[in-house]
Amino acid sequence: MKKLTMKSVDLTQVNIDKIAELFPNVITEARDEKGKIKRAVDFDLLKQELSDVLVEGEKERYQLTWPGKKEAILTANSPIDKTLRPIKEDSVDWENTKNLYIEGDNLEVLKLLQESYLNKVKIIYIDPPYNTGNDFIYKDDFKKNTKEYLEESGQINEEGMRLVPNPSSNGRFHSDWLTMIYSRLKIARNLLKDDGAIFISIDDNEFDNVKKICDEIFGTNNFITAIPWQSRQSIQNDTDLSTSHEYIIVYAKVRRQENRRLKESNINSWFKEKTFAFYPLPLDESKFENPDNDPRGKWKADPFDAPNVRPNLTYKIVNPNTGQEFWPPSGRCWRTEEENYKKLLADNRIIFGKNGESRPQLKVFYNEKRQFGSVENTWFDGTRCGTTTEGTKEQQKLFDGFSFFDTPKPTRLIKKILEITTAPQKDDIVLDFFSGSATTAHAVMQLNAEDQGNRKFIMVQLPEETNETSEAYKAGYKNICDIGKERIRRAAKKIKEETGADIDYGFRVFRVDSSNMKDVYYAPDKLKQGDIFDLTSNIKEDRTGEDLLIQVMLELGLELSLPMETKQIEGKTVHYVAGNSLIACFDDNVSESVIKQIAAEKPLRVVFRDSSFENDSARINVEELFKMLSPGTEIQVL
């Protein structure tokens, strides 16, 4: 039987495995901190493998670096001995919902989700701290114990939150923030589908650094755009210039090459292979008209010239009405080759302005183009996408006149992102790991209600405590997660009342906690003789079967939204995940009769505890039973 590790993925070893497949000669051996032999990489040899000249030493290169960058890479790759615990009392419609709300440090959560949501998330939207000098940043140090950390920062609470202020007087003002965001983005990329993308809200303080980090993590070719968003419409008179915008930086996971062409036979063949899955907006018919009574219906005139200079697309066009000659404007060319132009002209698809005396233009017909829709532009103005004032008013309507967050994002902004990047009926997953007031969850439900969609959200938020003098604390919200969860509940109620839509209004709540396993599970060699009587079980006494089930699901790569069911078989508690995808029994001394009934279900995977078997002979007997009754089952043990 295979023993589960009950740890998050060790990304360092995963990367070493990938390198070994390409360059087996650079894999060597080294001793770890415990003196054990492990696989390692000969980096000098790897450098030579990746260079076409003799590598003799370090050379200057173009890169973004800062004190703490290597620490960020190490932090991102290191596994953790933690888990997620189900909090059913805070959840809504636990049995049926596909949405998740996770409380905890988002770096730890991203690590824990690596197996279950690898390459499954369509869109990530985050609104991280902007590093204005008044923000808190996440301080990641998995080596210090609670006492040491408390002495260092004075900021840690009983939940173990690692929040420290990052004032501009700090000598590492940018470095600490970059170290924080780098490790999270590095892990988050693994969760995205190949046609997925990440949208990052940011302002001028860290705009250039975020873009450089994303160039490194996602690749410069995968940069889509930086969207200016009109975050406010009012004017500030206490600054040199009134800042009315922020940015949303957009990167694709994998950006395909753009491909534009026009088939000779049909103007409809204009297309652009999607950089990633942007979905078209409905075409505005009011922008089309038919002044010449063309039998093909309404049309609008588009420029016939295009960017760049290409010899085969550079030729003289003569206006047949006036004889006037035209060449492409400087630095541009025509949209088609000359033969194609002649066919378009003969088909009455080329015009020379309303009076027949201007530059050539292409007639684009509404009936032909509407199936392809319209492309969104990169200026997200406040009229179309809302402002922070609108975001504040939305919260006030939900929370009896109170807004517990400063400058919150409006629902319409996130909804606009979802409209152009997610398909309603494809079960797209939307992740926000700086959830804050849970605007993203609100936007997902609102859009689903409007287009009968089936999108699912995963919200992640650190349970940062509210100030005791704040209105939020006085209203009973002890931390930000309390506000976020209640915002989802109230928004769901409001949307259902207004639309009557039959969508998923629920969410499962999970909370980051220490592993369900005692230290002896991970380091049995450290067990002392005096500890034996205290360690009759390798599982912590306060943990339930459902706690164990969730940690097993995380290791086996099963989504936390899958249906879960518990049955009693001869007095033993048996857990089922997605039918027979996983069956687990964590009770002691499981009888052969119960084993046979489980095997009869022909599960894909089955998990027991060591103590489920009376002795080694019983364990071997279980393996033989499954070989006979369900040979395809993978058997694992805690």
Image: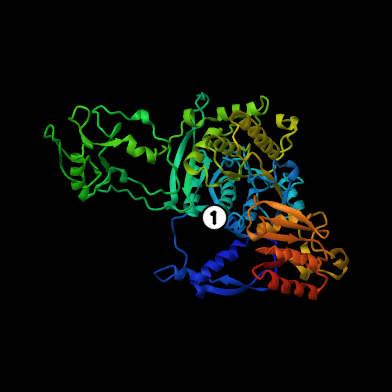
Relative vertical location of residue 190 with respect to residue 617 in this rendering, above or below:
above
Residue 117: % across, % down: 59, 54
Relative vertical location of residue 633 with respect to residue 574 in this rendering, above or below:
below
Of helix, strand and loop, which one carries label 1?
Answer: loop
The image quadrant of residue 523 is bottom right
- The residue located at (36%, 50%) in the rendering is 258
- The residue located at (29%, 36%) in the rendering is 364
| Residue 241 visible to the viewer | no
The image quadrant of residue 638 is bottom right
Could you tell me how many numbered marks the image carries?
1
Q: Nearer the viewer, residue 52 or 290?
A: 290
At label 1, the amino acid type is Asn
- Apparent side of residue 192 relative to residue 81 in the rendered image (left or right): left
| Residue 389 visible to the viewer | yes
- Apparent side of residue 450 relative to residue 479 in the rendered image (left or right): left
Farthest residue toward the left? 323
Identify the residue under disc 1.
119
Residue 528: % across, % down: 83, 69
Relative vertical location of residue 7 with respect to residue 507 in this rendering, above or below:
below
Residue 297: % across, % down: 29, 32
Q: Nearer the viewer, residue 460 or 586?
A: 586
- Apparent side of residue 74 relative to residue 230 in the rendered image (left or right): right
Name the colouring of the figure: rainbow
The image quadrant of residue 305 is top left
- Apparent side of residue 80 relative to residue 586 in the rendered image (left or right): left
Q: Nearer the viewer, residue 176 or 290?
A: 290
- The residue located at (70%, 59%) in the rendering is 552
Is the residue marked by circle 1 packed among few (<14), some (14-19), or many (20+) residues within 10 Å? Answer: some
Quadrant that contains the N terminus: bottom right
